[in-house]
Every structure is written in structure tokens, then in C-alpha cells.
Amino acid sequence: MLENNHLIDSCLLPFDATRIKAIPVSDLPQSDLMYWALERSGIYSVKSGYRALCDEARSREASSSNSGLVSGLWTNIWKVGVPGKVKHFLWRACTNSLPTKHNLVKRRVLSDLGWDRDFNWVNQFEAAQGSFQDLVAKVLSKPRMREVFATTAWFIWAHRNKSRLNEKTLPLSGIRDAVGNFLQLFRSCRDPPVSNKVMRRRKWTPPNPQVITKSTLMAPCLTKVMKQVWALWVITSGDISV
């Protein structure tokens, strides 16, 4: 390896040459072996290379995104007037951390990425444009749609999970009414009840001057301070009418 250092220095940049020469090399005589680090078998494939390029493109797109807009999105999600479990679902959906079919195939839990149902009214090309995070960002800018959209998406996700496990679930046609009832119940439990108690206005009426005169005459032996306290008590003991 030492005899090839001048060749490395002449063909590569100094930074790359330094890193290459720092790679430890075995002293035992053995032939070189091509190994692809992204596969357990070490064998390169076109599929693995394509996946690596896609991951690199996504990481560049994420790093170049505006961090202020992303943090604003998270803040707006937590402000949506829905239960915490719906907010948590929306956050996981935006970060692509839900066990969707695409993620399960990526983790090799499933092998088929095809749709289980055929919706003729869905244009798959248009549906594939953008991300769910982009859709949520647009919906959050419309106050009338935020709670309904988040709750509807949560109901659809729950329907999908129960259907996969062959459990009893709400039909898709009934999700609209269920969302309305769900939000109405949540708002009624969250908002405090409105009190119907009417506050009455109170009016202070000064005491009768004759009462002050009689009360003062009834305490001829009081000291000066006690007389002041006595007079203050008489004044403040006026009638309060409602």
C-alpha cells in the first residue's frame, strides 16, 4: 500500500487521499473483495442502488426545507381542537412514522405494495403528488376544516386497522356522522358550562342620622379612639338594599 501512496496523491484531492490512506489494511496476503455496505450479503443490486439514491434525495430535500415552516406546522397541529390521540396520529402521519403498507414493505414485513381496494375515482398519479405533510399544512390554514379533517383521517386509519384484523368497525359511509358526534361530545366536555345566574346590583344606603346621635349618646364614657371606632361601625352598618 505504501508504494501506491504517490499514485493516490496524484489522482485524488488531498482530503480524499488522506481518508483513503487512513483505512487500515490487513498484513495478510489476500485478494481484494468488492462489498456493498447497504446489503447484508454485500452484493450490489440495481434495486439497492436505486433505494440508496432515493433516500439520499429525500434527505437532501428534508435538510433544505425551511425549519421555521416545519416548526410552525408542529405548533399548528398542537393547537387543533381535537383530543390528544388525534393530534398524535396527525403528527405521526406527517413524520411518516405510521405502520403504513409502504413502510412495512420497506422494513420487509410485507412484500406486496399493491392496494387492497380498487377505487376507480382515485387518480393515483395525482394522489402521489406531494406528501401528507404538505396536505396537512394546507388544511391547517383553513380554521373551519382543521378539526373535521384531523378527526376524519383518524377515523379512516382506525377503520383500516380494524378491517385488517377482521374486527368489527364502523363502515366508511358512517364516518361522516361519527366525526360530527365525536367533535360535539369533545367540545361539550372541554368547554365549561355557561352559568345562568344573574348578578344583582347592590346599592348602599347611608344610616339614619338619628341612629348616629343616639349611638353616640349611649357611649359617653368611651375613649377618643373607641369613639372613632364606634362611629365608624355605625356609619358602615348602613342598610344595603338589593
Image: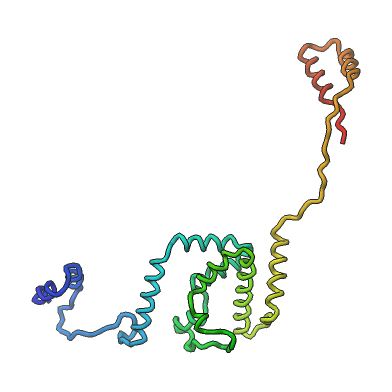
Indicate the quadrant containing the N terminus: top left, top right, bottom left or bottom right: bottom left
Residue positioned 80% across, 14% down in the render:
227
Eyeballing the image, is 139 above or below 224?
below
Eyeballing the image, is 189 above or below 9?
above
Q: Is residue 76 left or right of residue 15?
A: right
Q: Is residue 161 left or right of residue 195?
A: left
Quarter holding residue 215:
top right
Q: Is residue 209 left or right of residue 26?
A: right
Q: Report x, y in % for residue 18.
A: 17, 69
Residue positioned 49% across, 70% down in the render:
95
Q: Report x, y in % for residue 128.
A: 49, 80
Quarter holding residue 76:
bottom right
The color scheme shown is rainbow
User: Which residue is at the front of the view, 194 or 141?
Assistant: 141
Quarter holding residue 175:
bottom right
Residue positioned 38% across, 78% down in the render:
54
Indicate the quadrant containing the C terminus: top left, top right, bottom left or bottom right: top right
Q: Report x, y in % for residue 16.
A: 20, 70
Residue positioned 78% across, 19% down in the render:
229
Q: How many marks?
A: 0
Q: Report x, y in % for residue 212.
A: 87, 18
Eyeballing the image, is 12 above or below 125?
above
